[in-house]
Amino acid sequence: MTEPASLVVNDQSVAPGRVVAVCRSASHSFSKPVVDEIVLVAGLGVDGDAHNGRTVQHLSRVRQDPTAPNLRQVHLVHRELLDELSLQGYAVPSGAMGENLTTEGIALLDLPTGTVLRIGSDAVVRITGLRNPCAQLNQLGAGLMKRLVFPGPDGELVRLAGVMAVVDRGGPVRAGDRIEVSLPAGPASPLRPV
C-alpha cells in the first residue's frame, strides 16, 4: 500500500472528482449496500443510515462518550484504493468498508482538515479527519487491516481506509455526481483520526 502524498495546498485549485457509488445501511452492519441515491441531511449525515445523528453513532464511540459530536457523519473512500487492493488480491467492492460514498479523481487522504466538498447540485460536506479502522476489515480478507493501517517511516500510524466528514448542506447524491473541492484558507492542518 502506498502512503498518502504530503500535503500541497499553496495552489488552492484542486481538480474536481466524481461519485462512483453511494451506500447506506439502517443497521450497524460493517458493510453498506450500494443504492441508487442517498440524501445528506445538514448536521446529521445520511438519511436512513445507522450513523446519522448530531452525536456519535458508531457503537464504539457511543460507549466512550454518547454526548460527543458526530464528526463521522459521512464516510468517503476513493475508488483508487479499492483498485489497488484488487491488484493485491482483495475483492473490496464499494460499500464493503462501510463507506457512504466511493469517489474517484480526488486524493482524499492528501486533503487537509476542513476541506469542503460540493457534491452534485446541492450537498456540501466538510472533511473532519481520517477513518480509524478496526480489525473487522479482516472479514473482507485475511491481512487487510495491515494493508490499511501500518507504521510509517516516522513510526506514526498510516491510515488508508478513507476520510470522515460532516454535512454542512444537505441534498441528494448519486453515482456520477461531480465533486468540487475547496481547500480551507490558512495553514494546512493534516488529517488526524476522528
Image (cartoon, helix red, strand yellow):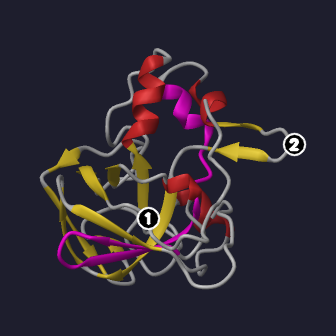
For label 1, the residue is 14
Residue 23 appears in the figure? no
For label 2, the residue is 155
Magenta part of the protein: which range? Answer: 115-139
Look at 49% across and 55% down and name the residue there. 108
Q: Is residue 68 left or right of residue 41?
A: right
Instruction: Give the position of the C terminus as an image quadrant.
Output: bottom right
Residue 14 falls inside the magenta stretch: no
Residue 153, x across and y down, in percent: 84, 38
Residue 17, image quadrant: bottom left
Q: Is residue 88 left or right of residue 133?
A: left
Instruction: Give the position of the N terminus as an image quadrant.
Output: top right
Q: Is residue 142 left or right of residue 172?
A: right
Q: Is residue 166 above or below residue 179?
A: below
Residue 121 falls inside the magenta stretch: yes
Q: At label 2, which amino acid type do we have?
A: Gly
Out of 110 and 9, give the one closest to the viewer.
9
Q: At label 1, which amino acid type do we have?
A: Val
Q: Is residue 56 above or below residue 175?
A: below
Mark 1 and mark 2 lie on one chain; the one further toward the N terminus is 1
